[in-house]
Image: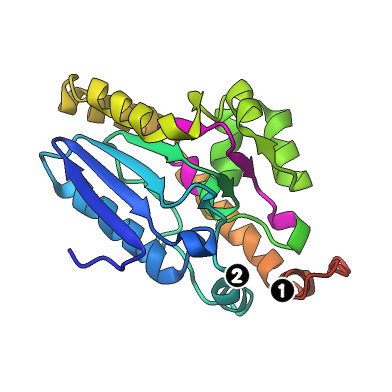
Amino acid sequence: MALPATILYEKRDHVAIITINRAEAMNSLTLEMLLGIEEAFDEFNADDDGWVAILTAAGNKAFSSGLDLKEAAPMLTGGDEMGFADHTKRQFSDVFKPIICAVNGFCIAGGMEMLLGTDIRIAADHATFGLGEVKWGLIPLGGTHIRLPKQIPWAIAMQLLLTGKSIDAQRAYEVGILNEVVPAAELMPAALKQAERMCRNGPLAMKTAKEIAVRSLELETGFVMEKALGARVLRSDDAKEGPLAFSEKRPAKFTGK
């Protein structure tokens, strides 16, 4: 397995630790990194000795600030594909082994979309969570419109999707996005403790329990609709103006077209 330097893979007994390693850029995600994450989880999925994965990130400021807009915005608004060629899939759709997410800071946009594809979530107490795409004339297309309202109350999901305003770790815990909030220094010990506890369970039983739960949600139709309807946003003038305003550090001038 030849991963980019921005994605690290470590194995401790039955636990795979996958780390987003671009702290100097707030762990923002390039296409190469997205493919690297997919490849790392393919490796975990294929490893009969890997029972639980921990997904985390380098540094103490950000889990991920989402897509690297310098690379992604021209591709997305130009009609190029960034994501699964199979529109019924999103990140971790086919990973039925348990995934623990250890959130070490900002978890926004594409970072939060990854979080929503995981199972057990532990965050440092300074972490924040949000979906700011609407502020820049964009929408998240990583499955969030389908996953989020199934995981937390409707009104809270709509607040996150429609306002672009972030919430802190304590609020994320209160509404059910997180399982646990811990001091930053205790984040990885807490994640490893949870993984080790789970590794005392039958691996086939855990994998099957998750597969039944995920398949029963029948997310595929929603994912296809999200992709199809989202295309009209990405083709809009607003989708070009938003990232440009972001890069120029000025308020966006939207027209609704």
Q: Position of residue 71 (x, y in %)?
A: 54, 76
Please tell me whether mark 2 or mark 1 is closer to you in this view.
Answer: 1
Pick whichever, 43 or 86, lies toward us: 43
> What residue is drawn where x is 55% and y is 57%?
66
> What residue is drawn where x is 58% and y is 39%?
127
The magenta span reads: 114-134
Q: Is residue 16 visible?
A: yes
> What residue is drawn where x is 69% and y is 56%?
133
Q: Position of residue 237 (x, y in %)?
A: 78, 75
User: Does the stretch in magenta take in 226?
Assistant: no
Viewport quadrant of the N terminus: bottom left
The answer to whether 83 appears left or right of 8 in the picture is right
> What residue is drawn where x is 77% and y is 57%?
135
Image quarter of residue 250: bottom right
User: Does the stretch in magenta take in 127?
Assistant: yes
Q: Earlier in the sequence, mark 2 or mark 1?
A: 2
Pick whichever, 92 or 86, lies toward us: 92
* Contact, mark 2 vs mark 1 (Cβ under 8 Å): yes
The answer to whether 178 appears left or right of 50 in the picture is right
Q: Position of residue 73 (x, y in %)?
A: 62, 73
- Indicate the amino acid at tag 1: Ser
| Residue designated by label 1 | 247
- Secondary structure under tag 2 reads helix
- Secondary structure under tag 1 reads helix
| Residue designated by label 2 | 69
- Indicate the amino acid at tag 2: Leu
